[in-house]
Image: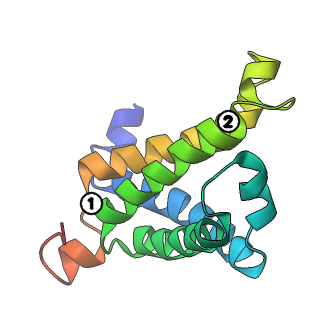
């Protein structure tokens, strides 16, 4: 019954992923632009935190906007996959409130958002932007 109601609208799947991940990255990036997390990056041992914190803020802001628009989707998704891998392994796995310390099920709360964003970006990397996008509707081709 649900299959008849909703049909086979697979072209909407990338759009929904782009909206969810795009909005999340866009607003997270905007917040980081206002106050780049240099001290936090230093605490995590991320190299060149004075450079990396603003870079990540810009990446998440611009990457989120690119996902929302469906413009350079695969490139943005690839860069944001790297961002989420570093976030998961550098910031969310260790520490007293991290996944490794809390275990399952409690530790899942430490990584759940990053894992969902990672999987959304991986899906977009493999699928592309979908038909409702600037790349497909305006440019008539994907950028990469």
Q: From the image, which quarter does the C terminus lie in?
A: bottom left
Q: Which residue is painted at 52% across and 57% down in the image? A: 21
Please give the name of the residue rendered at 46% of the width and 69% of the height, measured from the top-left corner.
63
Which is nearer the eye, 134 or 8?
134
Callout 2 touching callout 1 (CB < 8 Å): no
SS of the residue at dot 1?
loop
Q: Nearer the viewer, residue 17 or 1?
A: 17
Residue at the spot of label 2:
111
Q: Which mark is residue 95?
A: none
Q: Position of residue 120 (x, y in %)?
A: 45, 47
Question: Is disc 1 surrounded by few (<14), some (14 to 19) or many (20+) residues within 10 Å?
Answer: many
Tag nearer the camera, 2 or 1: 2
Residue that lies at the very extreme toward the top in this rendered image: 104
Q: State left or right for residue 91 relative to residue 115.
A: right
In the rendered image, which residue does mark 1 sit on? Answer: 130
| Residue 62 drawn at (x, y percent) | 49, 76
Report whether residue 10 is seen. Answer: no
> Which residue appears at 57% of the width and 66% of the height?
56
* Residue drawn at the location 78% of the way across and 56% of the way down: 40
Task: From the top left corner, tell me how far across and down residue 20 is, in percent.
Answer: 54, 58
Is 52 positioned to the left or the right of 92 in the image?
left
Spatial CA distance of label 2 from label 1 is: 27 Å
Q: Earlier in the sequence, mark 2 or mark 1?
A: 2
- Farthest-out residue, left: 140
- Point out the residue furthest to the right here: 96
Q: Nearer the viewer, residue 42 or 65?
A: 42
For residue 91, what is the image quadrant? top right
For mark 2, give the secondary structure: helix
Estimate how packed mark 2 is, as few (under 14), some (14 to 19) or many (20 or more) residues with alpha carbons within 10 Å. some
Image quadrant holding the N terminus, namely: top left
Q: Is residue 95 visible?
A: yes
């Amino acid at each position: 019954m649900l299959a008849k109601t909703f049909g086979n609208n697979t072209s909407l799947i990338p759009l929904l992923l782009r909206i969810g991940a795009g909005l999340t990255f866009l607003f997270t990036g905007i917040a980081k632009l206002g106050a780049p997390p240099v001290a936090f990056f230093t605490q995590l041992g991320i190299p060149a935190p004075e450079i990396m914190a603003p870079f990540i803020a810009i990446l998440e802001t611009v990457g989120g906007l690119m996902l929302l628009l469906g413009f350079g989707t695969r490139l943005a998704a690839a860069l944001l996959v790297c961002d989420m891998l570093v976030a998961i392994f550098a910031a969310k796995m260790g520490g007293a409130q991290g996944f490794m310390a809390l275990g399952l099920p409690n530790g899942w709360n430490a990584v759940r958002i990053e894992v969902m964003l990672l999987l959304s970006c991986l899906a977009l990397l493999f699928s592309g932007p979908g038909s409702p996008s600037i790349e497909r509707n305006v440019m008539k081709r994907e950028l990469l």
